[in-house]
Image (tube, rainbow, N blue to C red):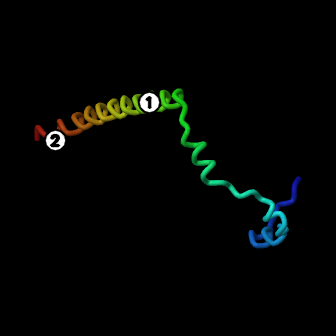
Amino acid sequence: MPRKNNRSASEKSAKRSPALKKSRPKINAKRTTSRLKKVTPAAKKMLRQGAKAIEQGVQVISQKAEQIGNVLVKPFRSS
């Protein structure tokens, strides 16, 4: 059974060597964003389909809500 690590965050960070911190590569923001911008036509199609499905879902939910509203309101209207 592994021993539970009860050291605080500051103790853990103190153990890490400064050389290790320096070796970590800096992320080139320009490169990553340009890579993210490229959305393939297939992905666009999928997004469109998803949007349509969500719209349909919203319509169904609003219809159901209306039905429930009618059921709840009707008895009170007559009184």
Residue 26 x/y as whole percent: 71, 58
- 66 horizontally vs 39: left or right: left
Which amino acid type is marked by label 1? Answer: Arg
59 or 44: nearer the viewer: 44
Q: Position of residue 16 (x, y in %)?
A: 83, 67
Residue at horizontal 51 percent and vertical 28 percent from the top? 41
Q: Residue at x 50, y 28 (%)?
A: 46
Identity of the amino acid at label 2? Phe
Graded by Cα atoms within 10 Å as few (under 14), some (14 to 19) or many (20 or more), the crowding at tag 1 reads few
Residue under label 2:
76
**Hey, which residue is sitting farthest right in the picture?**
1
Q: Position of residue 40 (x, y in %)?
A: 55, 31
Give the Cα distance between marks 1 and 2. Answer: 43 Å
Q: Is residue 3 above or below residue 79?
A: below
In the figure, 48 relative to 2: above or below? above
60 horizontally vs 74: left or right: right
Which tag, 1 or 2, sits closer to the chain's start?
1
16 in relation to 26, above or below: below
Q: Which mark is residue 48?
A: 1
Question: Which residue occupies 62% across, 48% down?
Answer: 32
Q: Please determine whether, in this image, residue 29 is positioned above or below residue 64.
A: below
Q: Indicate the secondary structure of the residue bearing disc 2.
A: helix
For residue 34, which numbered disc appears in the image? Answer: none
For the residues bearing labels 1 and 2, Cβ distance under 8 angstroms:
no
Helix, strand or loop at mark 1: helix
**In the displayed structure image, the side of residue 69 where residue 8 appears, left or right:** right
Q: Assign the C terminus to one quadrant of the image.
A: top left
Rendered location of residue 30, percent (x, y): 60, 52
Task: Give the image quarter of residue 12.
Answer: bottom right
Q: Residues within 10 Å of mark 2 (few under 14, many from 20)?
A: few
